[in-house]
Image: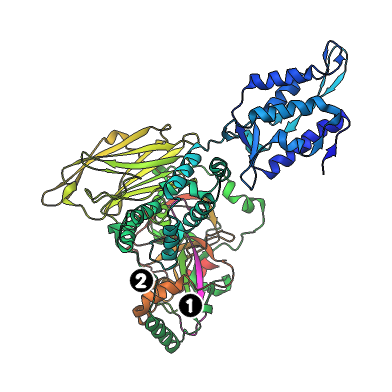
């Protein structure tokens, strides 16, 4: 029901409230109109009012500018009809007492009806107009049209890429909805490698194409759906599968072509988690025979009471939780330790210092988080003789942080040569590898003329901080020999101010070069290195452009520790690879990759079912809450770790050949 506005106060209040309602109910767009035309219309109608002092009462420059800005604002309703704000206002209120305004708004609506939308509405300030002004000479108070803009419209947002992307998708694929239906079916049947990652974009694109084919206002349709992920379908690799089907490529071949483009190292087919009925029956039989028939309910997170005195190297009995220091631990800035002036100790020396230590701090910047898990079976399911196991947050213990991120994002880390890029802001950086006969990058990820491949391309659509990209080769091909390669980084989309970027170069899984640089400006690149591969009697890489190289060390992050212990497979006996864990109460851990067991941790008699058990590990729920959480480091290779014992820093050498000769009395003394 329309409301009659009788007074100026009601009029100004109605405009204010109506705009709030409009921007809450709709996405606001801005049309391209002439400021002069709107001013002319305003002046023409304002002059019809009675003389007020020297000028007409409504001949107000503040109100005129406000009406001009409001004239630019339109929305699109659920029926894809464009509606201007002034039209929305007139639909809600009678302006019988302000006939000149009704005529003014009606004329403005008429001349703006065909003005094109130019983008999301944007205004530099929080307020359009002012609520009141005071004439200094007389003290008279004047009310004005005034509205408040939501915060999201005070930041300029460009959606031209989305608009153009959606236009291309609608134009190119509107007649091929049936192929998207097929792809969704193949995703459900696990024919598409990492298909679940593509399911949403395929579903939304299919839905939008179906709606578009019924719609008579294509322009309004596009603006209405600029927030859909379908805007990026044409630039997503899944669109190449539709392209093959459009071109009458056999579906089986089309799927293989797609999987080659996105599969990991050597582009082998991914392991499909499909099991035969026989495999499941055999697993069920053996689990029951071995005493693990209730495996689905057989695991919980370990608790402090699950640790005995002999399992622990050191614990801080004096620690008090809930203090300000504890709550703000992660926010306390600790100065970096100059390793050059720090005493070096081995593990035996560290254990000796633990005997009298009152506090232990560890630099966790290069460590992976881990959690202890307990099985609930009568006989341990693990290959060591206790019921406690461990799982790392990343699934990995022995890699640097950049490699951990690459692994998390599905990239290949086991390679002959690998280039892994890491950056801290929301820009869309692209890693390129180029020679005289090949160019590997986001639009040419797996060219046939080289063995190098790109398998991660991040921050295109949904940017995050801490993104990575990865180019690698698992085996050098003859086509790569004696060509000079250049590696560079290109800033495809600039979103934020420059921040630190790191490029690590790995040969045989070892870091051989590290480069640190700032983000390149928009649409510019930074050349980082050149190299040449030669093959005489043995493989060799000749590096050039070494002046760009930087030694990069991530800043230290010391965390106060509650408990120090060896991994459970080294408690009663020494089996497998040794780890040392630094536990801290209240440490948060991402449970997405936490499994109740890893295949290599299971008893040998179960390993014949490793395929079935690997699938099962992702489905078994670990009961309880993670309580024994901290950071771990493996003894698989020699490395250094900064620790503080009673605030004094040491460089602890982690040596694979360290022999644990600490006897039971020493362990108990350290615990107490």
Q: CA distance from mark 2 to mark 1?
A: 16 Å
Residue in the picture at 66% in, 43% down = 26
* Quadrant that contains the C terminus: bottom right
Image-based side of 496 in relation to 552, left or right:
right
Q: Position of residue 552 (x, y in %)?
A: 38, 42
Residue in the picture at 77% in, 20% down = 45
Few, some or many residues within 10 Å of mark 2 (<14, 14–19, 20+): few
Towards the viewer: 79 or 591 = 79
Q: Position of residue 547 (x, y in %)?
A: 29, 33
Image-based side of 438 in relation to 161, left or right:
left
Residue 424 is at least partly visible in this image = no
For mark 2, what is the residue? Answer: 576
Determine the secondary structure under disc 2.
Answer: loop
The first of marks 2 and 1 along the sequence is 1
Give the colouring mode of the picture.
Answer: rainbow
Few, some or many residues within 10 Å of mark 1 (<14, 14–19, 20+): many
For mark 1, what is the residue? Answer: 387
Q: Which residues are magenta?
A: 362-380
Image-based side of 297 in relation to 108, left or right:
left
* Quadrant that contains the N terminus: top right
């Amino acid at each position: 029901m329309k409301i009659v506005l009788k007074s100026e106060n009601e009029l100004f209040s109605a405009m204010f409230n109506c705009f709030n309602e409009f921007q809450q109910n709709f996405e606001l767009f801005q049309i391209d109109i002439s400021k002069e035309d709107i001013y002319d219309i305003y002046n023409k109608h304002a002059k019809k009012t009675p003389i007020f002092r020297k000028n007409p009462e409504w001949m107000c420059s503040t109100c005129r500018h406000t009406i001009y800005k409001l004239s630019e604002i339109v929305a699109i309703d659920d029926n894809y009809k464009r509606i201007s704000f002034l039209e929305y206002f007139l639909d809600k209120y009678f302006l019988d007492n302000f006939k000149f305004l009704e005529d003014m708004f009606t004329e403005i609506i008429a001349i703006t009806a065909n003005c094109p939308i130019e983008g999301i509405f944007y205004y530099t300030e929080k307020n359009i107009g002012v609520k009141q002004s005071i004439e200094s000479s007389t003290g008279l108070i004047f009310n004005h049209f005034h509205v408040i803009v939501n915060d999201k419209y005070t930041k300029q947002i460009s959606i031209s890429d989305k608009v153009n992307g959606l236009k291309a998708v609608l134009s190119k694929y509107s007649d091929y909805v049936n192929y998207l239906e097929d792809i969704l079916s193949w995703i459900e049947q696990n024919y598409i490698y990492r298909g679940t990652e593509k399911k949403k974009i395929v579903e939304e694109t299919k839905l939008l194409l179906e709606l578009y084919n019924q719609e008579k206002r294509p322009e309004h349709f596009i603006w209405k759906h600029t927030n859909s992920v379908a805007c990026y379908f044409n630039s997503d690799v899944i669109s190449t599968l539709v392209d093959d089907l459009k071109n009458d490529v056999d579906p089986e071949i089309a799927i293989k072509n797609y999987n080659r483009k996105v599969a990991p190292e050597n582009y082998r087919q991914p392991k499909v988690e499909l099991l035969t009925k026989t495999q499941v029956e055999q697993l069920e039989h053996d689990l029951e025979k071995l005493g693990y028939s209730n495996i689905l309910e057989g695991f919980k997170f370990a608790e402090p009471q699950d640790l005995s005195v002999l399992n622990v190297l050191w614990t801080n009995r004096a620690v008090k939780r809930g203090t300000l220091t504890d709550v703000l631990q992660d926010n306390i800035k600790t100065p970096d330790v100059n390793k050059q002036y720090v005493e070096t100790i081995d593990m035996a020396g560290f254990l000796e210092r633990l005997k009298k230590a009152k506090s232990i701090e560890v630099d966790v910047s290069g460590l992976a988080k881990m959690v202890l898990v307990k099985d609930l079976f009568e006989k341990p399911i693990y290959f060591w003789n206790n019921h406690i196991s461990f799982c790392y947050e990343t699934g990995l213990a022995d890699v640097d942080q950049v490699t951990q991120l690459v692994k998390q994002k599905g990239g290949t880390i086991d390679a002959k040569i690998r280039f892994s890029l890491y950056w801290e802001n929301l820009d869309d950086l692209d890693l390129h590898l180029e020679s005289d006969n090949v160019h590997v990058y986001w639009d040419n990820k797996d060219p046939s003329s080289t063995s190098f491949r790109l398998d991660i391309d991040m921050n295109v659509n949904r940017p995050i901080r801490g993104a990575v990209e990865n180019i690698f080769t698992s085996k050098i091909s003859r086509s790569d020999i004696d060509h000079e390669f250049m590696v560079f980084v290109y800033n495809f989309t600039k979103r934020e101010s420059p921040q630190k970027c790191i490029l690590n170069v790995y040969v045989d899984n070892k870091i051989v070069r590290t480069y640190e640089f700032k983000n390149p400006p928009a649409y510019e690149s930074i050349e980082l290195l050149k190299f040449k591969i030669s093959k005489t009697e043995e493989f060799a890489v000749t590096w050039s452009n070494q002046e760009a190289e930087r030694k990069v060390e991530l800043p230290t992050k010391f965390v106060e520790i509650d408990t120090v212990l060896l991994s459970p497979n080294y408690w009663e006996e020494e089996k497998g690879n040794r780890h040392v864990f630094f536990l801290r109460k209240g440490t948060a851990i991402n449970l997405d990759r936490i499994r109740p067991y890893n295949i290599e941790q299971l008893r040998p008699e179960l390993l014949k079912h490793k395929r079935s058990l690997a699938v099962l590990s992702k489905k078994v729920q670990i009961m309880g809450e993670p309580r024994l959480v901290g950071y771990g480091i493996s003894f698989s290779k020699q490395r250094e770790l900064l620790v503080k014992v009673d605030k004094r820093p040491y460089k602890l050498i982690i040596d694979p050949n360290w022999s644990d000769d600490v006897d039971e009395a020493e362990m108990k003394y350290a615990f107490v």
